[in-house]
């Protein structure tokens, strides 16, 4: 099961993560070769997220209907075609189309892997298997840092995409030939129960509480790590090429290890009856604090807050496992797709939006001022904070009620004693909290 199911899909997700984050390494060469400004650079990177997000729902339906083997095998062929076009592009529109094709081709990589895990692995081990899947896949982000910089110096970005084309074709063939077909997939193609509609997912109150925080934190983390972290380290921190590549490498390594760590923590906390939602909220709170430290320029080593920012991108381990608990197993792919649509939609808005905001300030020798990044990151931070408060609202409400009760009880006891000589009063009495509100 590990060799024939888990590892082939992990290889597909590795390619998806590599394609997602490689723009941070190749963007200086693209700016030099094509004369791109900040807005065009942001659009080129973020079009991947836009196409990726828009295709999540239909791909989720296809995965539930036809199974991950056939769907993922075909999609990776499209990604290989996009890599070929990107490596031979001679204009910005060609780069944009190629990047969109790559986004479409790897759009099902994570969902296909999660669908395979839900289908083949026992339910109590899903979150741990998710952690391993995302950890191995996120090594693509590690490869997109120092190793990619070395390859770029050796034979350039166009030859690099030729190698990626061959690798993508190879993984597509591996998935199609090695992964077995499961009988349950054909049974799901004609479901006995009513299908799970998009409206029923997006109107579920549990989904509505988790999704904004998951989208705001995970989408922002992806948008920052795959493009704007490198620009921040260069323009704000003043890093040279070698120092920037080294820090990006450690950030990506932290992302990979965090995926496994979060999966193991959630698995261990489950044994103590602590829900995965609590851990997800803690990751979101840490991300907000880290980004606030960046915006305020708190005097700490930049590696610390940036590592926390990258770690937040691994919280898909938690949010997808949470969603899997909310909906039936046979509709897991479309439920994950509904959440992933929000992840990548948010990543597109943040990545392109930061480029638009930063571009409002004039550049000097290709570098933008610190205040431009502070303004752009501050807007993203405000939205993340609002999503965190919305997620924590049930706990805030419960804490407020308990505090209200604890504050009001002594006053009510004294009032009853003074009014009746300590004799209990017959008839309905307001609850303590209601009494204070009244």
Image (cartoon, rainbow, N blue to C red):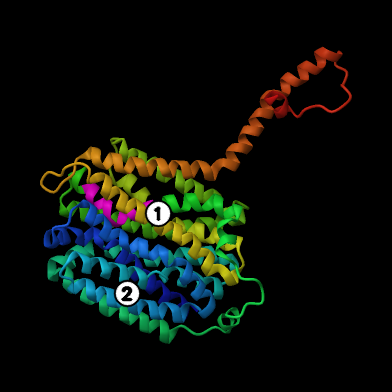
Which residue is label 2 attached to? 79
Query: Which quadrant holds residue 77?
Result: bottom left
The answer to whether 437 appears left or right of 366 in the picture is: right
Instruction: State the residue at coordinates (24%, 58%).
Output: 24
- Residue 412: image location, x then y, percent: 75, 21
Would you say residue 263 sits in the magenta stretch?
no
Residue at the image point whose x is 29% and y is 55% from the top: 250
**Crowd rating for badge 1 (residues with CA inside 10 Å; few <14, some 14–19, many 20+):** many
Q: Is residue 277 visible?
A: no
Mark 2 and mark 1 in contact (Cβ < 8 Å)? no
Residue range in magenta is 219-233
Q: CA distance from mark 1 to mark 2?
A: 22 Å
* Left or right relative to 47: residue 61: right
Q: Main secondary structure of the magenta part?
A: helix
| Residue drawn where x is 28% and y is 65% of the image | 143
The part of the image, by quadrant, that contains residue 200 is bottom right
Q: Please state the horizontal and vertical placement of residue 242, each as a whole percent of the image.
A: 17, 54
Say which mark, if any, is on residue 346: 1
The 10 Å Cα crowd at callout 2, few under 14, some 14 to 19, many 20 or more, is: many
Q: How many marks?
A: 2
- Whichever of labels 1 and 2 marks the residue nearer the N terminus, that label is 2
Which residue, as the protein is rendered here, is positioned at the far left? Answer: 365
Residue 438 x/y as whole percent: 70, 24
In the structure shown, which secondary structural element does the residue marked by tag 1 occupy? helix
> Can residue 329 be seen from the camera position used here?
yes
């Amino acid at each position: 099961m590990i060799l024939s199911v888990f590892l082939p899909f992990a290889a597909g997700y590795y390619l998806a993560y590599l394609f997602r984050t490689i723009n941070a390494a190749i963007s200086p060469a693209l700016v030099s070769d094509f004369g791109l400004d900040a807005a065009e650079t942001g659009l080129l990177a973020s079009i991947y997220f836009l196409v990726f997000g828009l295709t999540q729902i239909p791909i989720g339906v296809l995965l539930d209907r036809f199974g991950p083997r056939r769907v993922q095998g075909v999609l990776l062929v499209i990604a290989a075609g996009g890599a070929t076009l990107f490596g031979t592009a001679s204009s910005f529109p060609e780069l944009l189309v190629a990047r969109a094709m790559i986004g479409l081709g790897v759009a099902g990589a994570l969902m296909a892997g999660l669908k395979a895990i839900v289908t083949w692995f026992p339910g109590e081990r899903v979150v741990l298997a998710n952690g391993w899947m995302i950890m191995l896949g996120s090594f693509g982000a590690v490869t997109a840092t120092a190793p990619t910089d070395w390859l770029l110096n050796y034979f350039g970005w166009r030859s690099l995409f030729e190698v990626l084309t061959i690798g993508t074709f190879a993984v597509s063939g591996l998935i199609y030939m090695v992964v077995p077909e499961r009988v349950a997939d054909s049974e799901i193609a004609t479901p006995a129960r009513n299908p799970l509609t998009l409206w029923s997912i997006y109107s579920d109150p549990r989904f509505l509480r988790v999704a904004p925080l998951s989208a705001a934190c995970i989408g922002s983390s992806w948008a920052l790590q795959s493009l704007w972290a490198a620009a921040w380290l260069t323009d704000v921190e003043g890093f040279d090429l070698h120092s920037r590549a080294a820090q990006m490498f450690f950030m990506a390594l932290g992302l990979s290890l965090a995926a496994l760590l979060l999966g193991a923590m959630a698995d261990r906390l489950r044994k103590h009856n602590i829900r995965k939602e609590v851990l997800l909220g803690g990751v979101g709170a840490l991300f907000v604090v880290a980004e606030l430290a960046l915006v305020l320029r708190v005097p700490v080593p930049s590696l610390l807050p940036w590592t926390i920012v990258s770690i937040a991108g691994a919280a898909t381990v938690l949010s997808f496992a949470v969603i899997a608990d909310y909906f039936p197993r046979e509709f897991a792919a479309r439920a994950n797709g509904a959440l992933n649509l929000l992840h990548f939609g948010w990543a597109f808005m943040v990545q392109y939006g930061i480029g638009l905001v930063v571009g409002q300030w004039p550049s000097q020798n290709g570098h933008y001022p610190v205040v431009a990044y502070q303004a752009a990151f501050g807007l993203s931070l405000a939205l993340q904070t609002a999503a965190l408060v919305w997620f924590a609202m049930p706990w805030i409400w419960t804490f407020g009620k308990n505090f209200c009760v604890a504050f009001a009880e002594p006053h009510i006891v004294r009032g009853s004693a003074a009014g009746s000589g300590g004799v209990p009063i017959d008839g309905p009495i307001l609850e303590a909290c209601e009494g204070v509100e009244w």
